[in-house]
Image (cartoon, grey):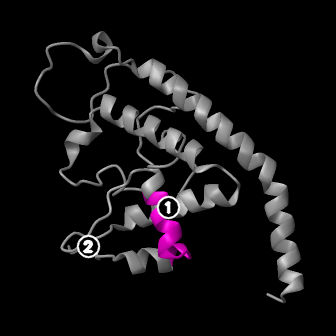
């Protein structure tokens, strides 16, 4: 099965934004910028679309970056990073579908538990790697602590989106009439 290869131009077209805008998201989130022979994946495009949607609701790039970093930390604590050699492993499976409470907001990874409201299941390990000398909690990394930080950041972003929904609805309604869409 061959995967479609997407260029930066394809990304911009599908996101509906120019390369400067996409580049600002990439730089703000410190994302890998694939260049031939490497290409963008469908998941990468979907991730940029999610970021664009959040920006439309007035969510600052710093808040998106903070959420993204927390998601990466969770994925690493659960060893998802060991399941792929791709430099964009954390984006490659991203989709715009939503509604599964076990999935992270940005990357869409299914954690097997609800990261917003469910109990944290310690000991989950989605990858395989050599045993460490110390457990992650002994090195100062606690899954429960990172989940708590993630929950707080999602709450902050959710509040901002909720505040802007009425304005976005009004803008869509007005623009439809004003510009006869």
**Residue 154 image-quadrant placement:** top right
Height in image: 46 above or below 178?
A: above
User: Is residue 23 visible to the viewer in this orientation of the structure?
Assistant: yes
**Residue shown at 83%/78% (left/top)?**
175
Q: Is residue 15 left or right of residue 168?
A: left
Looking at the rendered structure, which numbered label has been put on residue 3?
2
Q: Is residue 126 left or right of residue 177?
A: left
* Depth check, front residue: 111 or 160: 160
Height in image: 10 above or below 133?
A: below
Marked residue nearer the N-terminal end (1 or 2): 2
**Residue shown at 73%/45% (left/top)?**
160
* Residue 168 in the image, given as x and y percentages of width and height: 79, 62
* Residue 43 in the image, given as x and y percentages of width and height: 39, 62
**Residue range highlighted in magenta:** 14-26
**Residue 75 image-quadrant placement:** top left
Q: Is residue 153 left or right of residue 144?
A: right
For mark 1, what is the residue? 24
Crowding at dot 2, Cα within 10 Å, few <14 / some 14-19 / many 20+, comes out as: few
Height in image: 21 above or below 124?
A: below
Q: Please, what secondary structure does the residue beneath circle 2 have?
A: loop
Q: Is residue 90 left or right of residue 115?
A: left
* Residue 41 in the image, given as x and y percentages of width and height: 33, 67
Q: Is residue 160 magenta?
A: no
Looking at the rendered structure, which numbered label has been put on residue 98?
none
Quadrant location of the N terminus in the rendered image: bottom left
């Amino acid at each position: 099965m061959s995967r479609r290869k997407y260029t930066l131009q394809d990304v911009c077209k599908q996101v509906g934004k120019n390369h400067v805008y996409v580049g600002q998201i990439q730089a703000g989130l410190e994302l890998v910028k694939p260049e031939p022979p490497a290409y963008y994946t469908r998941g990468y495009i979907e991730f940029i679309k999610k970021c664009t949607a959040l920006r439309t609701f007035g969510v600052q790039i710093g808040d998106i970056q903070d959420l993204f970093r927390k998601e990466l930390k969770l994925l690493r604590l659960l060893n998802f990073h060991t399941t792929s050699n791709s430099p964009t492993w954390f984006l490659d499976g991203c989709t715009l579908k939503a509604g599964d409470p076990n999935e992270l907001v940005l990357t869409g990874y299914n954690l097997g538990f609800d990261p917003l409201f469910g109990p944290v299941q310690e000991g989950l390990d989605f990858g395989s790697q050599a045993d460490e000398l110390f457990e992650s909690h002994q090195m100062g990394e606690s899954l429960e602590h990172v989940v708590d930080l993630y929950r707080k950041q999602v709450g902050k972003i959710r509040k901002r989106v909720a505040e802007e929904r009425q304005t976005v609805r009004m803008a869509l309604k007005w623009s439809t009439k004003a510009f006869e869409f």
